[in-house]
């Protein structure tokens, strides 16, 4: 009798997948950069506690460029620069010319330097108002977080405003020439008078800048500035001879810095002479800067 053989079942083999040979990475294939580790001690060593003079100057010019772009995007800021010289020069010349000097032509050598001083004072008044507006809107809060010199946001707009003073002064002179004014000082006298007016406006702007840092709102800055502008402008020799004023008022006119600026510009425009009035005007402007620039910077630094 034959014994049946036992058949063992075979397990089916799984087909093997052919392996793809790995190709070496091409040297042109971009690879992820390795993470860069920064040593904190080395980063602290590379910083400085204060900005250098060059860095402060560059940052100030950047803030000045910001102020110029702001003026370009808001043309209404140029109304006092473009409209006021044209309006005030023609209005005062034809209204007061005959009453004060007998004719418009005789009054223009007296009026044009006075209008220059008034225009510069009015234009620089806007510096404090715009500064207060930026502080109220929180713009300076963002400047606090930037690694820039603390004086740059204050000095930048002051530098940019020099262009506004120059435009207002040139337009006033051009308007006077259009209605018959002929300065005897020639081109050099006119250039000197305009330069002195710009410097005077820049120096007086420190008064309104200080007001912008201590006042509570832009409206209050504007109101206080108007109270300062009108006495300085009209209680001077800008529009009438000082000899025609009462004695007590003449005493104030003689110490008014605007009176010295007006007299100096008249000497430059009409005679082309650098007289003692030019020196007194420059000294008066320097004194104003020496007094109010530190006050403005100190008050501004407390808020920054």
Image (cartoon, helix red, strand yellow):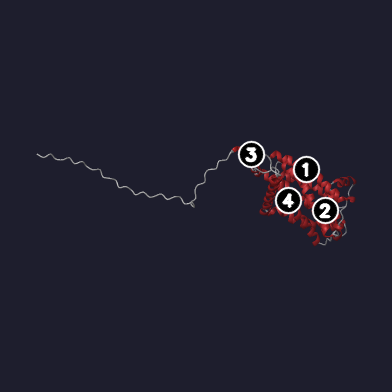
Which mark sits nearer the N-terminus, 4 or 3?
A: 3
Q: Are marks 4 and 1 in contact (CB under 8 Å)?
A: no
- Is residue 198 visible to the viewer in this orientation of the structure? yes
Say which of marks 4 and 2 sits in front.
4
Say which of marks 4 and 3 sits in front.
3
Say which of marks 2 and 1 sits in front.
1
- Give the percent coordinates (x, y) of residue 155: 72, 46
Q: Give the residue pinned by disc 4.
A: 161
Q: Nearer the viewer, residue 74 or 239?
A: 74
- Residue at x 68% of width, y 51% of height: 65
Q: Are marks 4 and 2 in contact (CB under 8 Å)?
A: no
Which mark sits nearer the N-terminus, 4 or 1?
A: 4
Residue 292 is tagged as: 1
Left or right of 231 in this view: 77: left
Q: Give the residue pinned by disc 2.
A: 114
- Give the percent coordinates (x, y) of residue 26: 47, 52
Distance from label 2 to label 1 (Cα)? 24 Å
Within 10 Å of the Cα at label 4, are there few (<14), some (14-19), or many (20+) other Cα atoms?
Answer: many
Q: Nearer the viewer, residue 6 or 208?
A: 6
- Mark 2 falls on what kind of element? helix
Residue at the outermost left position:
1
Distance from label 4 to label 1 (Cα)? 17 Å
Which mark sits nearer the N-terminus, 2 or 3?
A: 3
């Amino acid at each position: 009798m034959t014994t049946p053989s036992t058949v063992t079942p075979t397990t089916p083999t799984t087909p093997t997948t052919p392996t793809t040979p790995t190709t070496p990475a091409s040297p042109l294939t971009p690879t992820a950069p390795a993470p860069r580790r920064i040593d904190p001690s080395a980063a602290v060593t590379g910083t400085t506690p204060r900005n250098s003079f060059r860095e402060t100057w560059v940052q100030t010019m950047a803030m000045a460029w910001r102020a110029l772009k702001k003026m370009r995007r808001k043309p209404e800021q140029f109304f006092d620069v473009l409209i006021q010289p044209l309006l005030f020069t023609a209005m005062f010349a034809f209204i007061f010319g005959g009453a004060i000097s007998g004719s418009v032509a005789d009054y223009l050598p007296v009026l044009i330097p006075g209008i220059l001083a008034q225009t510069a004072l009015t234009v620089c008044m806007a510096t404090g108002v715009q500064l207060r507006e930026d502080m109220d809107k929180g713009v300076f809060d963002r400047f606090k977080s930037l690694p820039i010199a603390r004086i740059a946001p204050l000095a930048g707009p002051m530098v940019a405003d020099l262009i506004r003073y120059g435009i207002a002064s040139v337009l006033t002179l051009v308007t006077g020439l259009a209605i018959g004014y002929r300065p005897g000082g020639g081109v050099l006298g006119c250039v000197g008078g305009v330069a002195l007016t710009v410097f005077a406006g820049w120096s007086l702007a420190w008064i309104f800048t200080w007001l912008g840092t201590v006042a509570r709102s832009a409206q209050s800055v504007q109101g206080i500035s108007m109270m300062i502008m009108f006495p300085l402008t009209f209680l001077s020799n800008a529009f009438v001879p000082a000899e025609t004023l009462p004695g007590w008022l003449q005493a104030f006119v003689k110490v008014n810095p605007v009176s010295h600026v007006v007299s100096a510009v008249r000497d430059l425009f009409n005679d082309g002479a650098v007289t003692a009035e030019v020196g007194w005007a420059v000294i008066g402007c320097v004194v104003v800067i020496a007094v109010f620039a530190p006050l403005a910077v100190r008050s501004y630094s407390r808020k920054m």
